[in-house]
Image (cartoon, rainbow, N blue to C red):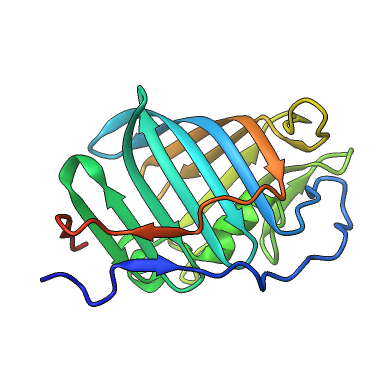
Amino acid sequence: MQPAVDTVQVSVDTVPVAPPAPKAYMPAVRRWLSIRASGKMDVPGLGGLDLNIFAVLAKDSVLYLHVSKFGIELGRALCTPEKVVVLIHPESAYWTGGYSLLRKKTGLPLDFDMVQDLLLLTPKNVRTVIDSNGYLRKVQWVSSDGGGTVTAEYGDYGNAGGEGVMFVYPKTISVSLPSMGGSARVTVKSAKPDVPGPASLKIPEKYKPLKL
C-alpha cells in the first residue's frame, strides 16, 4: 500500500545564517554547501564500489545525495534532522525511517548533526586532531555505549571552489567504520559555498518499501 505521504519537502528559507567561523579550518559556509566527488566504498558483503556523488547541504535543514556509476543513477537520499528517505533504483525500492533505527541496526552514532559536522568540518564535543596550521585532520564519533565509532580523516586542503571562487576544503575525506568492517574514501572534485540545490525527494508510485 502506498504511504500516505510520499514526498518530503523541506523549506530552507528560514535556515539561520551562522556567525563567522572562529577557526581557519572551518569553511565559510553560511547556508549551503554543494559538493561533487568520486568515492570508493568497501561494504561488508558487497566488496568495493566506485561511485560518483553529488551532495547538497542546507545547514540545519536538509542533506540531499545523488549517487551514480558510469553515468547511471543508482539512488538518491534525503536526510533531515528527523528522518532519512532513500531511493534504490536498481531494486525499484525505497526506505524511510528515523535515526534511532539506524543506530540500533548499525550500532553507530548516526544522526543529522554528525553527518553535517563531518561535511562542514565543525565537530562538537568529540575527539579531534588539528594540525599546527589550524586544519582539521581527524574526528572520531563514539556511540553512547562505546561500541561503535565513525572516524573521519581529512587529507590535504586546497581551493575547491573553482575559477574565481576561493574556498578551502579537503581534497579527500576517508571514513572508517571499524565495528562494521566498512570504509569509504571520497575524492572531492569541487566544493562550493552558498550554492542552492535540491531540497526534496519524491517516491515513485511503483517503488516498494524496504524494511531493515
Identify the residue at image location x=23%, y=77%: 4
| Viewport quadrant of the C terminus | bottom left
Q: Residue at x 65, y 69 (%)?
A: 13
Residue at the location (50% across, 58% down)? 199
Where does residue 159 sit, x and y in percent of width and height?
78, 30
Location of residue 166 (image quadrant): top right
Q: From what the image shows, is residue 3 above or below residue 128? A: below
- Residue 40 or residue 71, whichever sits in front: 71
Q: Which picture quadrant has residue 153? A: top right
Q: In the depicted view, which residue is nearer to us: 191 or 44? A: 191
Residue 127 appears left or right of 165: left
Point out the residue furthest to the left here: 1
The N terminus, quarter of image: bottom left
Front residue of this view, candidates 5 and 149: 5
User: Image height check: is 39 above or below 20?
Assistant: above
Tally the numbered discs: 0
Q: Looking at the picture, how far across and down is residue 135, in whole percent?
A: 81, 41
Residue sticking out furthest to the bottom:
4
124 on left or right of 204: right
Q: x, y percentage for residue 33?
A: 66, 49
Against 5, residue 158 (above or below) is above
Q: Say if residue 140 shows up in the picture.
A: no
Q: Where is residue 59 in the image (x, y as percent from the top left)?
A: 65, 62
At 58% from the left and 65% from the top, the residue drawn is: 113
Residue 26 vertical position relative to residue 161 in the rendered view, above or below: below
Q: Is residue 136 left or right of residue 42?
A: right
Whether residue 57 is visible here, answered yes or no, is yes
